[in-house]
């Protein structure tokens, strides 16, 4: 992959920057239960603050479907970030309200606007009018064709944040020179993960599928795809499947894991996820783990610190490993090419 433009390549001193972050954190009863994704944005935020840059934070939370849902407000995230930075982070509900004189502010949940997920040009322009530069530090969201990912780069000088660049650096090494055999472990309930199986068949050595995902498979795959059986009630994988997966994991050189093995939040259904998580982190393989639910499961079982790399995104991680790029990467790279061409004209 070509060298990606960094926030450090732009002259952002005393300018206004739109910073796309990934603050789609897990909540319980309105409280943040894992703030890892907020913490990951601090490197870029602190760099910009040191440049005396004015920052307008952009993020989404959950799936409000283009409607205002108070329980998916970014208010708690703004408060959490404010404590980390030891300063207040004002939260604004509309683009018209934003106070551009503040050092750092946050715009309310982008998905409250229908134009975010539809990549609406008018919504992109309303966001672009707020700043002079755009920085994408939301790797986990960059497989989406959304306004804040692919709609903003054509309108503003753009680059990537420090956490985004770290993700690409680590995952590129895994993709280009993995330690074999490579085992891909897929779980959870998001069926779009099944779309990447075909792309991985020629690269990975074995694919393990658990969780609700195992019930969504409607076609036959080669023997290298091993599908777990579920217990009655379909909320966890069977003990037989756990043991089969553990033997394969123990022999792996690289493990890529995205998605829990069952409804790990419930005490009666966590055994599959807990045992597979333990087998993965205790293996001798290089371990790359991604996705909000997978991260939350590791946190629950106190295993977060035992992995080699924790990617902020499940779907984005898988797409990058399969394709070597993402829509969010392509949008900024194309913008950079346009800028180079215009300078040469």
Image (cartoon, rainbow, N blue to C red):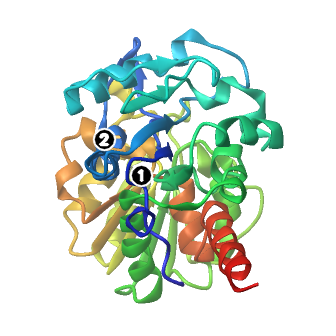
Where disc 1 sits, the SS reads loop
State the residue at coordinates (23%, 32%). 85
State the residue at coordinates (63%, 51%). 149
State the residue at coordinates (44%, 70%). 168
Q: Is residue 6 left or right of residue 303?
A: right
**Cα separation between marks 2 and 1:** 9 Å
Residue 127 showing in the rendered view: yes
Q: Which residue is labeled 2 in the image?
A: 36
Where disc 2 sits, the SS reads helix
Residue 179, percent from left and from top: 34, 86
Q: Are the residues at dot 2 and dot 1 in contact (C-beta closer than 8 Å)? A: yes
Residue 135, percent from left and from top: 50, 54
Figure check: 219 above or below 252: above
Q: In the rendered structure, which disc, 2 or 1, sits on the residue that comes first in sequence?
A: 2
Residue 117, percent from left and from top: 74, 39
State the residue at coordinates (23%, 49%). 304
Q: Residues within 10 Å of mark 1 (few under 14, many from 20)?
A: many
Figure check: 51 above or below 71: below
Q: Residues within 10 Å of mark 2 (few under 14, many from 20)?
A: some
Residue 34 figure quarter: top left
Image disc number at residue 312: 1
Q: Is residue 55 left or right of residue 20?
A: left
| Placement of the C terminus among the 4 image quadrants | bottom right
Q: Is residue 325 left or right of residue 171?
A: right
Figure check: 252 above or below 315: below
């Amino acid at each position: 992959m070509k060298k990606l433009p960094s926030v450090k390549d732009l002259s952002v001193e005393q300018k206004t920057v739109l910073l796309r972050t990934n603050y789609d954190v897990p909540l319980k009863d309105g409280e943040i239960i894992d703030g890892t994704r907020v913490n990951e944005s601090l490197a870029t935020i602190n760099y910009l603050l040191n440049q005396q840059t004015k920052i307008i934070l952009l993020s989404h939370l959950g799936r409000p479907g283009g409607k205002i849902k108070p329980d998916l407000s970014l208010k708690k995230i703004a408060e959490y970030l404010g404590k980390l930075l030891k300063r207040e982070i004002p939260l604004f509900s509309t683009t018209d309200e934003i106070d551009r004189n503040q050092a750092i502010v946050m715009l309310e949940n982008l998905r409250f606007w229908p134009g975010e997920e539809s990549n609406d040009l008018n919504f992109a322009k309303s966001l672009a009018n707020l700043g002079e530069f755009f920085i994408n530090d939301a790797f986990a969201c960059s497989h989406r064709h959304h306004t804040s990912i692919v709609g903003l780069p054509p309108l503003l000088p753009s680059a990537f944040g420090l956490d985004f660049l770290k993700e690409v650096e680590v995952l590129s090494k895994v993709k280009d020179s993995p330690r074999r055999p490579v085992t891909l472990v897929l779980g959870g309930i998001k069926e779009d993960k099944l779309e990447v199986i075909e792309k991985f068949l020629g690269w990975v050595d074995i694919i393990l599928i658990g969780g609700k995902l195992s019930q969504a498979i409607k076609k036959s795959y080669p023997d290298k795809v091993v599908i777990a059986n579920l217990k009655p009630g379909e909320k966890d994988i069977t003990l037989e499947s756990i043991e089969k997966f553990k033997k394969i994991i123990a022999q792996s050189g690289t493990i890529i894991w995205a998605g829990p093995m069952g409804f790990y939040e419930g005490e009666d259904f966590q055994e599959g996820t807990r045992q597979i998580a333990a087998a993965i982190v205790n293996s001798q393989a290089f371990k790359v783990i991604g996705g909000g639910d997978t991260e939350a499961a590791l946190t629950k079982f106190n295993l977060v610190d035992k992995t080699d790399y924790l990617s902020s995104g499940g779907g984005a991680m898988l797409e990058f490993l399969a394709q070597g790029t993402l829509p969010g990467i392509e949008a900024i790279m194309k913008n950079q090419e346009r800028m180079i061409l215009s300078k040469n004209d």
